[in-house]
Structures are given as structure tokens and as C-alpha cells.
Image (spheres, helix red, strand yellow):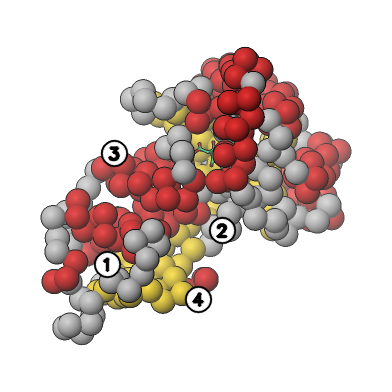
Amino acid sequence: MSCASAVGKIILFGEHAVVYGRPAIAVPVSDVRATVTVESAERGAGITVVARDIGRTIRMGEAAADEPLTFTVRNTLTCLACDERALDLNVTITSTIPVAGGLGSGAAVAVALIRALCAHLGRPLDAAQVSALAYRTEMLFHGTPSGIDNTVIAYEQPVYFKKGYPIETFAVRTPFWLVVGDTGRPGLTKESVADVRAAWQRNPTHYNALFDTIGHLADRARQAIEAGEIALLGPLMSENQACLRELDVSSPELERLIAAALAAGAAGAKLSGGGRGGNMIALVTPERAARVQAALYEAGAKQVIVTGVGV
Ligand code: MEV
């Protein structure tokens, strides 16, 4: 039996603008994970994929061509030059990453699946190859993904991402803490990305300027993180949220949690990921974390985790 896992991710700065070539910053979150086991099955059984958390059992060959799990298995086997008809495997997926929460659950499942298949077949791929394979699955989910989710999850390091440029990882000089609050409402990344695109097409000048502002915020945030100037990050997060609001990807639930976090003493807060639901993040000192966490639950968050970046 082979087993592999993949972490979740948080976009700290730059979601949506990153689709249009502006820089964004994302970090891995190891508090949540997708895990995949691959076992040999009876001869002639073929390949069966079981996604425990969503109660699905899918047999290769019977699934639609765009079913994301079997699509990922097929792409991986093709990349490894393995004939899927010659394999008998039971593939089991579990995950603690909230689905459609902006924490990269789709990309993490794809990365864990690719890694577990590679381990089982004794054919390891490097992070760049795993990321490229997972990107294909992201295209099924999101239509026009930037590639940031699969990149940060496959590399498991803080990433400064600019579409079309080599991956840049960077160091976190002084650790900092985030409270991550789940609205409990699924984020609609595909829809929000498509809506932003339609709005950009209607008014490119306005939206390009907004994307530029977001890109500059990501650049300033990277400098602050590398210099250990954590106090600068809170205001930058709140400025980024103002831009996301203007892009119309926030939601009343996200705004309620963001306001609650700020009122409880967070230094800054914003949505993270596609928006319209999913998760928000708030920058806190370790002393304030419990208070902000409690305030988020009181404001209706379904789940709240506290995670350290660079810890
Ligand atoms: C989704 O986690 C982040 C978005 O910027 C989309 C993308 O980068 O593909 C909203």
C-alpha cells in the first residue's frame, strides 16, 4: 500500500489579480490535508476511486471524461506511460480541507492523488511535474486558473507567484499568526473568476488599475514578510480586501466575519481564495488569537483554525 498527502493553502495577497498576470503570495497550511492511499486490487478489478468524505465510488472507464478524480488518475498514468487497462488498484481519498473553502481542496486532492500513484508505481515526479499535472485538474474546476493553488501545494513553501514566470519561493523572516474563519457557505471560484473576467472585458481600464493596485500590495507584502515587518501586513490585508470588495467577490458572510475579527483586535483581515463564501483570514498576535477565534464563532463561522506562517 502507498500513501501520500498534500497540504492546504492560503492566498495572503493577490487572488483574482493573479489570473491577469499580477503577483500574488500564498503559503501552505499544514493544519489541513488531503490524503490518498493506493492499494493493489484483485486481478481484473480495474481501478476504483473512493472519495470517502463525499461518499463517492467511481470506477475508471465508467466515469465521464471530465470527472476530476478519474481525470487526474488518467493524466498521471499517461504521464508515467502506464496503461490504465493493465492496472488493478483501489484508490482511497480522505481530506480535512473544507471543500470550496478557498483553501485549495481541489488542488490538494489532485497533488495527493498524483503523489500516491507515483509512489505506488515507483516512479517519483518532482514538484514542478506534480504541479503541472495538478494544473490540468484545476482547469477542469476553475476554467482559467492562474496556477497558484497547484504551485504552492506541490512546492509546500511560501510562494511569490506571477503567471508565466519561474516560481519564486521566499523566506518568512519573523513568524506570524493567522486566524482562518470558514463562512460555511461554499466559495464559488469558477463563477467569481468568470464574473471578474466579464467585468474586466466591459471596463478593462478600471479593472486593470484595480489589478495593478492589488499587485503592488502583494509586492509590498512580500518585502514586509522578508524583512520581518509584520506590523505592515495588517493594513495591507485590509487594503487588499477593499479592492476585492470592489471586484465584487466578497459576500455579506465574509464581511461579517472580517468586521468581527477587526473588532476583536485583528490587525487586518480579508477573504482568501475565490471569495463569495469560503474562508477569510485575519492577522493576529498569538495573545489575540483566542479572542479573535471566539469572535468569529460568535459571528457565525462554521470552523475557525489558528495557523502559524513560518513557524
Ligand atoms: C483561487 O484560489 C484563486 C483565484 O485567484 C483563482 C486563480 O488564481 O486561479 C481566485
- Mark 2–mark 1 distance (CA, rounded to whole Å): 24 Å
Instruction: Indicate which disc residue 99 carries.
Output: 2
* Residue type at tag 3: Ala
Q: Left or right? Give the position of 154 relative to 250.
A: left
Rendered view: 130 above or below 207: below
Label 2 SS: loop
Label located before the other in sequence (1 or 3): 1
Q: Earlier in the sequence, mark 4 or mark 1?
A: 1
Foreground disc of the pair 2, 1: 2
Q: Which residue is painted at 38% across and 55% down in the image?
A: 110
The residue beneath circle 3 is 128
Could you say where residue 185 lies in the image, as x and y percent from the top left?
A: 70, 56
Upstream in sequence: badge 2 or badge 1: 1
Q: Separation of disc 4 and disc 1 at Cα? A: 21 Å
Residue 2 tag number: 1
285 or 113: nearer the eye? Answer: 113
Residue 50 image offset from top left, x and y in percent? 40, 74
Q: What is the distance, in whole Å, between disc 3 and disc 2 at their CAs?
A: 24 Å
- The answer to whether residue 147 of the structure is visible from this angle is yes
Spatial distance from mark 2 to mark 4, Cα to Cα?
13 Å
Q: What's the residue type where badge 1 is placed?
A: Ser
Q: Position of residue 187 (x, y in %)?
A: 63, 50
Q: CA distance from mark 3 to mark 4?
A: 31 Å
Residues packed near mark 3 inside 10 Å, few (<14), some (14 to 19) or many (20 plus): some
* Label drawn at residue 55: 4
Question: For mark 4, does the 10 Å Cα neighbourhood hold few (<14), some (14 to 19), or many (20 or more) residues?
Answer: few
Q: Is mark 3 within 8 Å of ligand 1?
A: no
Left or right placement of residue 275 versus residue 123 in this view: right
Locate residue 231: give its quadrant.
top right
Q: Residue at x 69, y 45 (%)?
A: 276
